[in-house]
Image: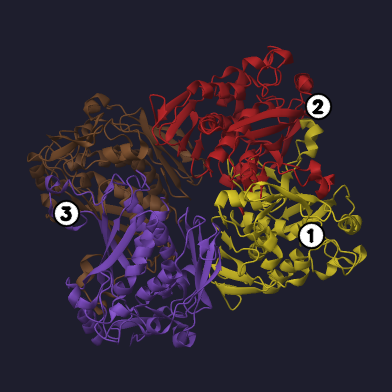
Chain colours: A yellow, B red, C brown, D purple
Amino acid sequence: MNTFGEKWAFTSFGESHGRAIGGVLDGVPAGLCIDLNLIREELTRRSGRTPNMVGTVSEGTDPRLYPVPDATLAGVSSRAKNEPDEVEWLSGVMDGVSLGTPIAFIIRNKDARPEDYEWLKNTYRTGHADKVYEQKYGIRDWRGGGRASARETAARVVAGSIAKQELATKGISIQARLIQVGAEKDPARFNETIAAYQREGDSIGGIIECRISGLPVGTGEPVFDKLQAHLAFAVMSINACKGFEYGTGFEGITQPGSAINHISGGIAGGISDGSEIVFRCVFKPTPSTKKALTKLLNDQINEPIVNRQIVNRSDACVAVRAVPVVEAMTALSLVQFL
Amino acid sequence: MNTFGEKWAFTSFGESHGRAIGGVLDGVPAGLCIDLNLIREELTRRSGRTPNMVGTVSEGTDPRLYPVPDATLAGVSSRAKNEPDEVEWLSGVMDGVSLGTPIAFIIRNKDARPEDYEWLKNTYRTGHADKVYEQKYGIRDWRGGGRASARETAARVVAGSIAKQELATKGISIQARLIQVGAEKDPARFNETIAAYQREGDSIGGIIECRISGLPVGTGEPVFDKLQAHLAFAVMSINACKGFEYGTGFEGITQPGSAINHISGGIAGGISDGSEIVFRCVFKPTPSTKKALTKLLNDQINEPIVNRQIVNRSDACVAVRAVPVVEAMTALSLVQFL
Amino acid sequence: MNTFGEKWAFTSFGESHGRAIGGVLDGVPAGLCIDLNLIREELTRRSGRTPNMVGTVSEGTDPRLYPVPDATLAGVSSRAKNEPDEVEWLSGVMDGVSLGTPIAFIIRNKDARPEDYEWLKNTYRTGHADKVYEQKYGIRDWRGGGRASARETAARVVAGSIAKQELATKGISIQARLIQVGAEKDPARFNETIAAYQREGDSIGGIIECRISGLPVGTGEPVFDKLQAHLAFAVMSINACKGFEYGTGFEGITQPGSAINHISGGIAGGISDGSEIVFRCVFKPTPSTKKALTKLLNDQINEPIVNRQIVNRSDACVAVRAVPVVEAMTALSLVQFL
Amino acid sequence: MNTFGEKWAFTSFGESHGRAIGGVLDGVPAGLCIDLNLIREELTRRSGRTPNMVGTVSEGTDPRLYPVPDATLAGVSSRAKNEPDEVEWLSGVMDGVSLGTPIAFIIRNKDARPEDYEWLKNTYRTGHADKVYEQKYGIRDWRGGGRASARETAARVVAGSIAKQELATKGISIQARLIQVGAEKDPARFNETIAAYQREGDSIGGIIECRISGLPVGTGEPVFDKLQAHLAFAVMSINACKGFEYGTGFEGITQPGSAINHISGGIAGGISDGSEIVFRCVFKPTPSTKKALTKLLNDQINEPIVNRQIVNRSDACVAVRAVPVVEAMTALSLVQFL
């Protein structure tokens, strides 16, 4: 339910506006030197506050990060900009080295503002999980999406960073990057594209490509536990992700076998073949926009009470901040096979 | 590894040209009346021998099955045409009713012809899993792909049919159909398209759409075990599947949030919202074609020995026969949530 | 439910008087040479038909097997004596070597005599699982206990023997033996003790001791997955087993810490310490005896209909035949930690 | 590894003298009213500081708790007496009601005194897990046993109390009590027995009996997942537990089937039969005693450096404080079957 993986079992917990979010990562081998600064950097990437996201393309050095054109951090929500994600490490690490015991950590919700969401107490937003939560559980934490909030992905990024550090010791690296925003495929124009939608009070989707290199031959199992199935499972569990493809993908549909039978996408019969693995995933635009007239439902009578512009703290293009989350889930998926 | 699911745990076994393939389905509640004829029909759909696949479109009644224009069963392999998949039931069923104990079944490999593959003993085919198996296991059943053969999907269809029958008792139905073959989106032209590729000694991919109706609100878990993640995992585990999308998918990438925030695809926050679920998946063309010059490797020296035309028993468009397999895996995925 | 273990996942299936019992053992590494004769011998040990169980103690060579004094095989049921347990191997093995794919096997129920149990159709026996099955499932295979029959343990012995063969390649050996029958602790008198109870139409329990040697330091996990917890789980899942102890066990209760703090029983903090592991388990007498007046219940009205002597095909001392089953479950438990 | 159960998945974390111990309990249904006072009381029972453990038997009202004769709390370690176990609730509960999301909690290690254990940095104690940890992980938290410390059981008691509260809503209750200390079976004499061993600087074991009432018929699975196997697994995972038995157990070994075939122990064929379930488990004396000369090993040269009296903070009879832990693990085991 809230645990991902078995060999490296990552349990995530916490509501968006509760006391804290956090996680327990069990299965990390003893003796791994954990670079806490790297984890901080990953959280900064996820927050959208990363320095090299403010500037121009030419200044960018990290191919993963497409700069945001000005200090207003186009398209990034206010909470992301303001809340430092400070990790408190509770167990499993001594003097920067893993003990082989569960690594538990928490991130306090410092900018939690339940009062901002008071009006949601008896209301559902369309495009959100408000209503299904109420239907499924009979109770729901209405404070900013509660458990359904993408804030939960901060815990994934922490655990995923540890997984990436373990993979790095084996020469395996993972790099995701945004390759498309709306119809735009030129990274140099991503920021202005996002900013344009934001000015309209609207939102837009994006496509992320992820490359895995250094993965040894033989990773994955031939029948149900195919490597691509596990990668799809990991990535499709990220909020707002609507599709996954690898190798020839959907785009290869018009090509005959004789033309593309040499393209493995890095996987044959569910098992890595030693070449680079490339997959793509698509993120929908956030439904919480100023422009969108969101239908609100009264949860007592389950009928629309008003169509209302939602002005909340969401991003204009969630795909931007999903980049490190895709890497994190990819890493957490791969370490299961070590 | 070879088990799918936990509540309904389906274990698949068997090599393509060994003594038998089969499966064990554990977790089926006691008292389910199992219609063995329905299971036979599903196997016939998978075999490509189904009667209403020979005829014209206008005669077709089942929207899932697009007729093959003539009795030669365009694009279907010789083994599929010749081998009756007779199921022997070993346990778990008494007088047609499930006992609540594991249901075990086998399908004997009657048309097994290991001698047809003798030449593969020291040779790998590109586009197949021959080489990675050897690398992963140090040993491999070279007889027709062994465990990697799509023949294994017959066991999935048997188990999936039982799952569908259980779902049907709860008003849940699953219908998959081929919606695209190569660039062709008109079902009336699918057969001639496939036949054209086959005449060229080539192969082509296809896209399958699957619809789930009647699924109650609340199916799926909010964080890692999102319904879409599990569906993707199930479908991506099918041989030759290269991509999965639902709701707005990859195609929705150009639409802003204000235009599409009402489209849930039947799932919100990982949980079914009570509306119909629609997903699509893409199957690549088989690499074993007459036209394709397949690079063969000598497994002793790991170097190409010859580029050779592969004339074996594969289909021209594997997506055709994947339709019931997609339904089966969807059903096996859904019953885990009951 | 019917699967034991995750790394080596053993799925058992089959009803006592159905078509076959069998199993699927998934996770066996490729390349293990499997000695089918050893498996046959283990099945013979379980059947009670083993040659060196007929003879005198002095002739015995295998310390595990205590000879039965005469050719009548005291205390062994008629079915065990008459039914050869022939294993048909369906998959996962090629030329005697494991392929790394699931190993499936079946044992046909040749001596199945459902008609012997016809009278049980509307009747429950006390001391058996007849009634709880009916209550749990609403349906039950009344033929000789169906799934609850100890016949199921034959499949465990087959899988356990493969596990033992893998462990042997790593220098790990498992030896169980009967150390007590009723109050009798002298092995030389076990047969006459059992025979005496059998003559009375009665049954008696036994204690089995099991020793594991060669297990490397570090096996087991420190918190929930302690080695002793997993061994207890494995052994307590055997029919008629009522208790498990290791190290100082129940008997050490009167000794102070200063006297016994050096006795680890081979395990410290849940983790093997490199010394021999010794545990004991107790098996109750079978409830199906000639002497016992078993209360029979009419399953329609759930009231006693008669107190009746049960003359069926059970053993006088089930602990005798449980010896190889204890070894099998121990082996299946240990391979999970490899 | 550090997770118990699947439906109610309880993950435990934390080192004895690290920053905190804690846990995540996932799978608690939404809407359970959680009585935090009850949880505090359970922690007090585990700490040995419970008021009715000081006094005389006649004053006792709770049959589970045998009073300690004077205010010195015979046999209870100094840490247990001094450290209040305050639970901080991080997630999953809103206004005292469970949300259906993971319940995370921590207990800070306020009385952590790593410096007390500084001398253990390069030393192993016999009877403890010091050495196997070092061998297994290559690194170890030497501070008071680290992860191997029984302090971890506080987290089990918190989670177990929530499980008991859920079970109580279904009419299921669990009561464990100490029934034997050393050779002493009269509860009125337990305290003086323990005090006598303590005066000698020694320690002693105990037997705990646990009764489960109200469990509906049908709990447990017939083959591997027998109810007794799961109870044994749960209880044998508690530190210092050396044996488990139920029903006729080891003691029934001398009784023939005709005499005891009516005793089910509440379970038939692995499935609860509706009657009260009774099991017993035995706890060894702690190896850390003043009297015991514990062999200490230099971990560099792996040889004895000194035989030394260990004067640390352990209990004279750990079975006393294990009583609520046995209940907790029993509860956590049972909720898996709901």
Q: x and y percent of residue C69 in the render?
A: 11, 42
The part of the image, by quadrant, that contains residue B195 is: top right
Residue drawn at x 71%, y 27% is B317
| Residue at mark 1: chain | A
Q: Secondary structure at mark 2?
A: loop
Q: x and y percent of residue B110 in the render?
A: 51, 21
**Are dots 1 and 3 in contact, CB under 8 Å?**
no
The residue indicated by pointer 1 is A311
Q: Is residue B335 left or right of residue C240?
A: right
Label 2 and label 3: CA atoms lie apart by: 75 Å
Q: Are marks 2 and 3 on the same chain?
A: no
Mark identifier at residue B184 = 2
The residue indicated by pointer 3 is D253
**How crowded is the residue under tag 2: few (<14 C-alpha within 10 Å), some, or many (20+)?**
some
Position of residue D39 relative to residue C213, above or below, is: below
Give amino acid for label 3: Ile
Foreground residue, B305 or A157?
A157
Q: Secondary structure at mark 1?
A: loop
Label 1 and label 2: CA atoms lie apart by: 43 Å
Give amino acid for label 2: Glu
Q: x and y percent of residue D316 in the render?
A: 29, 80
